[in-house]
Structure formats: structure tokens, C-alpha cells
Image (cartoon, rainbow, N blue to C red):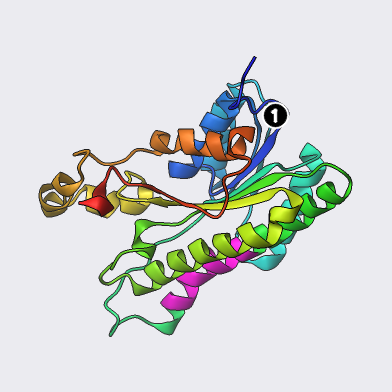
């Protein structure tokens, strides 16, 4: 029987997986049969996400990790592989905003945005790749690296130079890794969400002008939801995408096409 999206026996790690898009992806992968590891900063949200995910009857591991700190990423990856025995999919989803006019943007803000949105992805992918390459050398090739970027990385995002630059960088990073790691059966792709209803966009969601002027320009005529990312997560974690690498998947309700 053809079951391309069955994730039974696979383990997926999601950074920033305790809420928003990250939790939406983690839930879908758990429902498809994967064991899940989530990293998050908020212990309360971590506990709530863990309970939600355990309802799917799969193994769940939760850890507090500040992805902007290299040592914590390294320790977190070691713990994940030890707890679960393996990692098949690693989704670098954790990210922060940080908008300001370019003339008022501080070096501190610029560096902070890049530390979480770019440096952390590099450390996460580097450590994950080490594990996946070792598996490949032992005859167990394969793996999927996914970074959640943003449409801000491919279009002009006014007052968002730091954020847009960080997201454009990780899309390019994924393309480079797709070529470099393909010999080990490891794929690398990026996802570029548009306007999605999460904590990061809470201000815009409550802004009357934004909802009257911007959201009606989305061809789907609505905000995206975290669950809209479940399907792409399952696809990229599954064997169905074994030949699909180096791609940026734009999920924005058609916004960038209009």
C-alpha cells in the first residue's frame, strides 16, 4: 500500500515549536506518526505544547533552548539524539521580529535579529547535519532540514531591513546546503510564510488600518493560520519529498503574486 506521508518511525525536531507555526507543524507531523522534539523558551508554553502533542500517542521531548546561544543549541541537539535515538527532520522555526526605520535601527537590534534568525539556523543545521552525515556513513542515509523564513526575504519589507536580510540569508543557506549535503541523502528547503496569525503579528492583527488595507490584498482574503503549515511540514518530513531539495515554498495565500 502506498503511504508516502506516513512518518511512523521518524523523529522531527522543531525549534520554537511551542506555539504558532512551529506548533502547527509539530502537531501535523505527530498526527502523521512522527515522534517530536520541541525547543522553546517559555516553560509554560512548552508544557502546554507537550500535552497537546502527547495526545497523538507519540514520544515527545521538550527542552528549553535559547537558540541565539551556540552552546545551548549544541547541548540541545546532543540531548535530542540521545533521547530519541535519531533525528530525521529538523525544522529551524524559531525567530523574532525587529522592525525600525533604517535611520533609527541600532546595531544592537540588527545583531539581535540576526542572532536568532540567522546564526541560530546555522548552528541548528550544522549540528543536525553532523548527526545525519554520521548516520549516512553507517548506511542510514537521509534527512530533511527545513528553515521557516518569510516573504520579507524575497520582497521589499519597509522598516524591516534586519528581519528581511536575515530571512533572505537563511533561504540562501538552505540552497547551499541542498547542494552540499545531497550526497548523504539530506535535503534542505525553506518555507516563506506571508501574513500569518501568530504572536509575532499580534500588533498587525489588532490594527484596524492593516486589516482594512493589507489583508484584503491577500487573494485568499484572510490571515494564514498555523495549521496551514501542517501539510508542508509532513511533506518535507516524509519520503514523498525524497527528491525535492533546494526549494523555497511560499505559503502566503497568493499575496506575493498579486
- Give the main secondary structure, helix, strand or loop, of the magenta stretch: helix
**Is there any visible trace of residue 162 in the rendered image?**
yes
Residue under the point 39% across and 36% down = 228
Return the x and y of residue 65 as percentages of the image width and height: 63, 54
251 shown above or below 175: above
158 shown above or below 60: below
Residue under the point 59% across and 33% down = 240
Label 1 belongs to which residue?
59
Residue under the point 23% across and 47% down = 205
Query: Callout 1 environment at 10 Å: few (<14), some (14 to 19), or many (20+)?
Result: some
Viewer-nearest residue: 7 or 213: 7
- Magenta region includes residue 118: yes
18 shown above or below 97: above
- Magenta residues, start to end: 109-122
- Magenta region includes residue 241: no
**Is there any visible trace of residue 128 in the rendered image?**
no
Viewer-nearest residue: 143 or 52: 143
Residue under the point 30% across and 81% down = 102
Return the x and y of residue 227 as percentages of the image width and height: 41, 33
Q: Is residue 164 left or right of residue 103?
A: right
Instruction: Please state, as top left, top right, bottom left or bottom right, where the N terminus lies in the image.
Output: top right
Q: Is residue 206 left or right of residue 18?
A: left
Amino acid at each position: 500500500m502506498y503511504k508516502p506521508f506516513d512518518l511512523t518511525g521518524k523523529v522531527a525536531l522543531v525549534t520554537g515549536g511551542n506555539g504558532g507555526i512551529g506548533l502547527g507543524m509539530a502537531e501535523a507531523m505527530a498526527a502523521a506518526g512522527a515522534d517530536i522534539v520541541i525547543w522553546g523558551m517559555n516553560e509554560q508554553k512548552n508544557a502546554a505544547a507537550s500535552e497537546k502533542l502527547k495526545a497523538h500517542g507519540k514520544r515527545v521531548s521538550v527542552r528549553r533552548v535559547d537558540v541565539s546561544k551556540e552552546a545551548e543549541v549544541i547541548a540541545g541537539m546532543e540531548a535530542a539524539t540521545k533521547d530519541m535515538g535519531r533525528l530525521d527532520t529538523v525544522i529551524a522555526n524559531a525567530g523574532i521580529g525587529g522592525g525600525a526605520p533604517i535611520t533609527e535601527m541600532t546595531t544592537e537590534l540588527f545583531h539581535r535579529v540576526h542572532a536568532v534568525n540567522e546564526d541560530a539556523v546555522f548552528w541548528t543545521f550544522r549540528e543536525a547535519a553532523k548527526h545525519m552525515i554520521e548516520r549516512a556513513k553507517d548506511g542510514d542515509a537521509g534527512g530533511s532540514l527545513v528553515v521557516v523564513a518569510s516573504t520579507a526575504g524575497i520582497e521589499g519589507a519597509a522598516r524591516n531591513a534586519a528581519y528581511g536580510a536575515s530571512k533572505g540569508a537563511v533561504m540562501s543557506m538552505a540552497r547551499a546546503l541542498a547542494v552540499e549535503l545531497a550526497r548523504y541523502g539530506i535535503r534542505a528547503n525553506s518555507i516563506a510564510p506571508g501574513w500569518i496569525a501568530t504572536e509575532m503579528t499580534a500588533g498587525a492583527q489588532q490594527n484596524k488600518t492593516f486589516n482594512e488595507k493589507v489583508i484584503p490584498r491577500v487573494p485568499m482574503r484572510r490571515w494564514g493560520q498555523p495549521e496551514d503549515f501542517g501539510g508542508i511540514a509532513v511533506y518535507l518530513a516524509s519520503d514523498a519529498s525524497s527528491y525535492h531539495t533546494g526549494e523555497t515554498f511560499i505559503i502566503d495565500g497568493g499575496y506575493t503574486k498579486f
